[in-house]
Image (cartoon, helix red, strand yellow):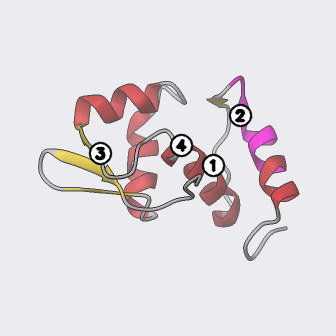
């Protein structure tokens, strides 16, 4: 259905289809839709702030009990990076 960047209405459609009351109910198979969902999650992290693994898990639990899948998605798709002890946001949309 979506192959490239999504319009704002398509982005909202993905979020409506995959989230209820701020919680993730489904993770899209299509990458473009999954990126919309991961961007929404990434926005919960402040750019420039270093987070411990426990802090990342606490934020991710607000979205889903499966924090490992979300964390791996954020790392694999370039929304976050990590070293041995800290995580930080390095991608996604930023409100100005």
**Which numbered disc flags the more N-terminal residue, 3 or 1?**
1
* Quadrant the C terminus occupies: bottom right
**Callout 3: 10 Å neighbours few (<14), some, many (20+)?**
few
| Labelled disc at residue 77 | none
Gap in Å between the C-alphas at discs 1 and 2? 9 Å
Quick check: 18 left or right of 64?
right
Name the residue beneath numbered marker 4. 41
Q: How far apart are marks 4 and 1 (CA)?
A: 6 Å
Residue drawn at x 24%, y 36% as measured from the top left: 53
Residue furthest to the front in view is 96
Number of the label disc, if any, that sits on residue 37: 1
Q: Which of marks 2 and 4 is nearer the N terminus?
A: 2
> How far apart are the alpha carbons under marks 3 and 1?
21 Å
Rounded to the nearest angstrom, the CA distance separating label 2 from label 3 is: 26 Å
Q: Do the residues labelled 4 and 1 touch (CB within 8 Å)?
A: yes
Please tell me whether mark 2 or mark 3 is closer to you in this view.
3
CB contact under 8 Å: marks 1 and 2: yes
Picture residue at 52% right of the left edge, 45% below the top:
43
Dot label at residue 19: 2
Is residue 23 rendered magenta in the image?
no
Q: Name the residue under label 3.
A: 49
Residue shown at the point (38%, 40%) measured from the top left: 68
């Amino acid at each position: 259905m979506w192959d490239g960047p999504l319009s704002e209405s398509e982005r909202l459609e993905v979020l409506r289809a995959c989230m209820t009351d701020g919680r993730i109910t489904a993770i899209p198979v299509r990458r473009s839709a999954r990126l919309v969902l991961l961007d929404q999650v990434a926005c919960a992290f402040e750019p420039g702030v270093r987070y411990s693994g426990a802090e990342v898990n606490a934020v991710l639990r607000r979205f889903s009990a499966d924090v490992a899948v979300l964390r791996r998605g954020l790392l694999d798709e370039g929304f976050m990076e990590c070293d041995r002890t800290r995580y930080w946001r390095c991608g996604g949309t930023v409100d100005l």
